[in-house]
Image (cartoon, rainbow, N blue to C red):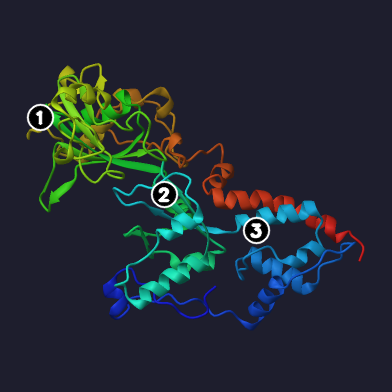
Amino acid sequence: MVDEPTLLRGSYREAVGPAERTRATPTPSTEQERLTALCLQPAELLTQLRERTEDEVQAIVMILNHEIEVPNVPPFLIRSMDPSELACFEDIFMALEYPLYAHLAPGQRFFANMTKGAILAQIYVGVEAAPAQKRDIENFKKTLSRITLDMDTRVVKITFKGKQSAARWSGWQMPLAGKPLLLIDYESIIERAKVTKELVLLGSYQFEVEVRKGEITSKDMRWVLTQKLGLKVQSMMHPVTEPTGNKAQQWQVRIKANGCPEEIRHKSPVVVDSAEIVLHHLNGNVNWPCRRCQSPEHPTKYCRVSEAELETEAVKYKIQCSGKLPSTLGHSSRVYAAGNHPKTMADLEALLRKDGDNQRTKTSSKRMTVGSAPKRENASKSNSTADMTGKSSLPTEWGQSVNPDAGASKEDSTGSHDASATCIGQDFGSTEETKQKMPK
């Protein structure tokens, strides 16, 4: 823990100019300093275990509640815990570490299974950086406990010894290989999502799709992504190009997946019916795929494939889908035209409900949120402008849907960090009761 206040700056302008935000490390109290020193004192093994002192018990409680942070398990525990109890507490101690996450910038690529030292070597600023920036890097490397890099999910996980240390760096921009990566406290977001029901984006994957041939509506695009490619679409939006317009033949898609699914990994064009769309994995590639060889790994101007190999190379990245687009079968309109759109909210809800009934499966139709209104007996006889009686919850495969039968068990599984600590803590409680029975 760094004792002196540190101004966290994400850019050179912030480093040399007035700081807009200050995050000072809390000054520990005298009691915290005394118990921290107790946890750092070396201890020798005894031939017979003894009872823990009041200071030792208080130090353990403060560690469990993130009131003090120590780099390792307190050595004095070897005098009051047998090997099985000590192993259990070590698992608890490791579970108390608090993680922050950062997403790699587009185009950043690293080797798999990089060591902590190799990753830390990539966290640097140039010689022209301000002294405050260099000091921040040094303090950050001293504070963190572990750091891992997953290239499949393209997520960097930085673990600190406690929540207090992690809170100090949350929102800071970590310079990894010259790219500033924002550190995000997803653990707090997961806890908040239990109340707000917001979607946690840690387990989502985002990419872009664009129509290069033919005409495709949003319903057609969703049909291709879900029915033909088997993706779990969470959202589809046209990118906004200016305050009054958007790209009608391009979508930003977010799906439920920890990383890029195998079905679309290393793939670019998708041909279905008379249309052709192209996938852009914006998390890993800055530029759109090559128009000559269809490779998603390089743009057109850097293509080095010869003319004789173009056709063979393009087949590697192509996805050919069978079937007809829903709009070509008369299930929806092929063009955006005025005059046929609903005029009232009741008409819109009836149209949405009718379209949903045609696509909803028996399983998804049974998913209802907790406290939703009961089904009406005469629902089948009501006209198309009747109000909706319930709203479907999130799909269960998203991992955040409401399950009224599961109750607390579903809620506990939302945060793996808290769940693991709770599970281990129950075992620790049983050993604590055993220790109370030991003679002095």
- C-alpha span from label 3 to label 2: 24 Å
**Element under label 2?**
strand
Badge 2 crowding class, 10 Å Cα cut-off, few under 14, some 14 to 19, many 20 or more, is: some
In this rendering, does residue 397 appear at all?
Answer: yes
Residue 332 occupies which quadrant of the picture?
Answer: top left
In this rendering, does residue 199 appear at all?
Answer: no
Q: Is residue 405 left or right of residue 384?
A: right
**Residue at the image position 17 percent from the left and 36 percent from the top:** 303
Point out which mark residue 196 bears. none
Q: Is residue 419 left or right of residue 433?
A: left
- Residue marked by disc 1: 335
- Residue marked by disc 3: 93
Relative image position of residue 393 (x, y in whole percent)? 41, 38
Q: Quadrant of the C terminus?
A: bottom right
Foreground disc of the pair 3, 1: 3
**Element under label 3?**
helix
In the displayed structure, 54 sits above or below 170; it is below
The foreground one among 131 and 106 is 131
First-in-chain label (2 vs 1)? 2
Relative image position of residue 166 (x, y in whole percent)? 49, 64
The foreground one among 272 and 240 is 272
Point out which mark residue 155 bears. 2
Residue 169 occupies which quadrant of the picture?
Answer: bottom left
Residue type at numbered disc 1? Val
